[in-house]
């Protein structure tokens, strides 16, 4: 954890522990040297005990000379990297993946990514998705439908800021998919949320909306030219389209107003058309954090969407 | 996996949801894990009987094996309650702690860790840790800031604080035992009973062997004349109680009943 080498012995939950290989038949003690996990960085990450049986070469072996185990470890590292990075909700850049994990295994990067994506899906239920075609940045989309009761057993209470995001997304859609920043604050002021005042729950709403949500790709924030005083326009970002849908947002807005989505015919039609578009490629749309906040209970694996699977 | 002695199980959405939610915690107590498992069964398969927790976890671990992570079970050093954490089995450049903290913060943790391991009691005083602030790698940190960082470690359950002194949280021991044993082989203490890493415990004043408090509790349970298992000398310390989850629950209930009675009187 502090970037120092560790043995692979698998301590059992029982009290008596075998310090060595833990009875793992496929890792003969003799060959331990080249099987100890290596990182992509060179000498900097090498073990502190050269000469001990733990030491391994400072750089990764030449392509072709890698063992099955080394490949497995690389995939494991990549899976962990993607999981941890995604927790911050910032899209993961290909360059970061190459720099921090892949390193000398660059020649097989596409395979490693594919294997990592498979494991993420099979083991954790997360789909690795490219944010936009050719963007070379990725997010994890949850293929499990979030349940309201999940909140009771979570360890991190989600993020309270999601509520604010929901409201802004709803506002944008209801106003025709684009809105000015001025309009956003006019609306939020009525809820006691101000750009210049610290908020008890949301902290710094201005930073959240114009920086954090934009960095996380939930929103797009662009300057409107020739405006004085300068104004900006806000639209849905690519992550929003991957994690939720117009129909889901409309249902959320309707729920807040205790009305029916059909009470907004224009938006309803637009949402329907969007559903149809998603249904055409017959892939299921992933559920996500956003949906659970909107309280969509068991809408099922909604409609498909044009997603760009992790393929390189 | 070639030659693996363990049969690899199958993941279903129950297991996936369990893992996803488990990962939102740094460490959990057994009752929390049980509650989580119940929740996941309820969501995906109401009618199925909830599998025995140990089997359920072993099943998941058989699949996590190829990813070099595992749901590990341990017990707390103070009262022997079972805890669970998802731990890394291979050291890689990627780690949860490394991504949550800055370079100087990680180095502060390392310094505290070393003081804790070297100490006789398993505790390092705040003063001693803060005095090392000038030696930290990375960006310069003031003592005031270091105090704040130590509190961050307590909140995220890497350290426990008791009266101005710090020791390792069960979570840190679960995650780092291997690393600690390898990095500080001469300084580490081991428990004479369970043979695992010992940070806090009791020691024999004659021969010096050490035991975890819960190991003492279990070993000397209903023994009116406790004697050192190594040198047979009289064991001079107070023998703690064995952890009983049932008693825990009852104590919790009676406490809350008492509280509500009190409030009604006002």
Image: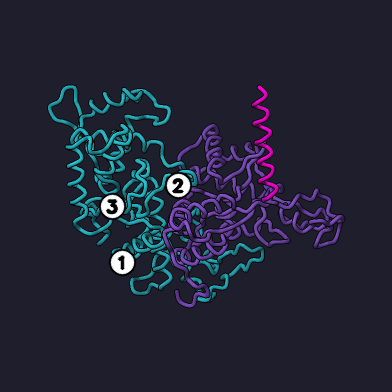
Cα gap from disc 3 to disc 2, whole angstroms = 20 Å
Residue B107 lies, in percent from the top left, at 52, 46
**Chain letter for the cyan colouring in the rendering:** A
Quarter of the image containing the C terminus of chain B?
A: top right
The answer to if B38 sits in the magenta stretch is: no
Q: What x and y, as percent, mark residue A287?
A: 33, 50
Please report the residue visible at 59 percent of the width from the left and 51 percent of the height from the top: B31
Label 2 element class: helix
User: Which residue is labeled 1 in the image?
Assistant: A111
Work out whether disc 3 and disc 2 sit on a shared chain: yes
Q: Say which colour chain B has.
A: purple
Q: How many discs appear?
A: 3
Residue labelled with disc 3: A302
Label 3 Cα neighbours within 10 Å, binned few <14 / some 14-19 / many ≥20: some
- Mark positioned earlier in the residue sequence (3 or 2): 2
Q: Residues within 10 Å of mark 1 (few under 14, many from 20)?
A: some
**Cβ–Cβ under 8 Å for marks 3 and 1:** no
């Amino acid at each position: 954890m502090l970037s120092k080498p560790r043995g692979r012995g698998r301590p059992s939950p029982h009290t008596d522990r075998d310090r060595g290989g833990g009875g793992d038949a496929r890792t003969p003690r003799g060959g331990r040297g080249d099987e100890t996990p290596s990182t992509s960085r060179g000498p900097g990450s090498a073990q502190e005990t050269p000469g001990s049986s733990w030491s391994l070469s400072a750089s990764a072996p030449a392509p072709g000379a890698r063992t099955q185990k080394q490949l497995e470890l690389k995939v494991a590292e990549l899976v962990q990297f993607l999981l941890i990075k995604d927790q911050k909700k910032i899209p993961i850049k290909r360059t970061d993946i190459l720099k921090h994990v892949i390193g000398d295994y660059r020649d097989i990067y596409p395979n490693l990514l594919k294997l990592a994506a498979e494991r993420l899906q099979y083991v954790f239920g997360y789909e690795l998705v490219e944010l936009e075609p050719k963007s070379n940045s990725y997010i994890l989309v949850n293929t499990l439908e979030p349940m309201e009761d999940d909140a009771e057993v979570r360890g991190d209470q989600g993020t309270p800021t999601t509520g604010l995001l929901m409201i802004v997304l709803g506002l944008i859609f209801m106003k025709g998919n684009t809105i000015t920043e001025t309009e956003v604050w006019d609306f939020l002021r009525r809820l006691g949320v101000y750009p210049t005042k610290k908020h008890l729950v949301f902290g710094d709403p201005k930073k959240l909306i114009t920086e954090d949500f934009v960095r996380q790709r939930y929103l797009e924030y662009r300057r409107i030219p020739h405006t004085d005083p300068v104004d900006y326009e806000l639209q849905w970002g690519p992550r929003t389209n991957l994690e939720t849908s117009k129909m889901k947002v409309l249902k959320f807005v309707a729920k807040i107003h205790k009305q029916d989505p059909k009470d907004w015919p224009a938006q309803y039609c637009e949402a329907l058309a969007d559903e149809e578009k998603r249904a055409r490629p017959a892939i299921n749309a992933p559920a996500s954090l956003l949906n659970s906040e909107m309280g969509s209970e068991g809408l099922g694996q909604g409609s498909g969407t044009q997603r760009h699977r992790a393929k390189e | 996996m070639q030659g693996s002695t363990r049969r690899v199980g199958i993941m279903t959405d129950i297991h996936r949801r369990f893992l996803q939610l488990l990962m939102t915690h740094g460490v959990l107590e057994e009752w929390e894990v049980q509650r989580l498992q119940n929740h996941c069964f309820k969501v995906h398969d109401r009618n199925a009987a909830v599998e025995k927790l140990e089997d359920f976890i072993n099943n998941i671990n058989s699949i996590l094996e190829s990813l070099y992570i595992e749901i590990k079970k341990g017990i707390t050093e103070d009262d022997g309650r079972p805890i669970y954490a998802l731990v890394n089995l291979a050291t890689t450049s990627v780690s949860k702690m490394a991504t949550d903290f800055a370079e100087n913060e990680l180095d502060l943790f390392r310094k505290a860790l070393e003081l804790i391991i070297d100490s006789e009691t398993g505790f390092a005083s705040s003063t001693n840790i803060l005095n090392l602030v000038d030696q930290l790698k990375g960006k310069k940190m003031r003592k005031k800031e270091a105090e704040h960082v130590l509190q961050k470690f307590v909140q995220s359950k890497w350290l426990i604080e008791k009266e101005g002194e710090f020791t390792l949280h069960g979570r840190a021991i679960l995650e780092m035992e291997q690393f600690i044993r390898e990095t500080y082989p001469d300084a580490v203490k081991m428990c004479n009973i369970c043979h695992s890493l010992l940070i806090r415990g009791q020691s024999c004043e004659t021969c010096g062997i050490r035991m975890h408090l819960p190991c003492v509790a279990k070993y000397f349970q209903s023994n009116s004349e406790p004697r050192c298992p190594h040198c047979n000398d009289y064991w001079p310390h107070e023998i703690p109680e064995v952890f009983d989850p049932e008693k825990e629950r009852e104590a919790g209930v009676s406490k809350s009943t008492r509280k509500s009675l009190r409030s009604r009187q006002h």
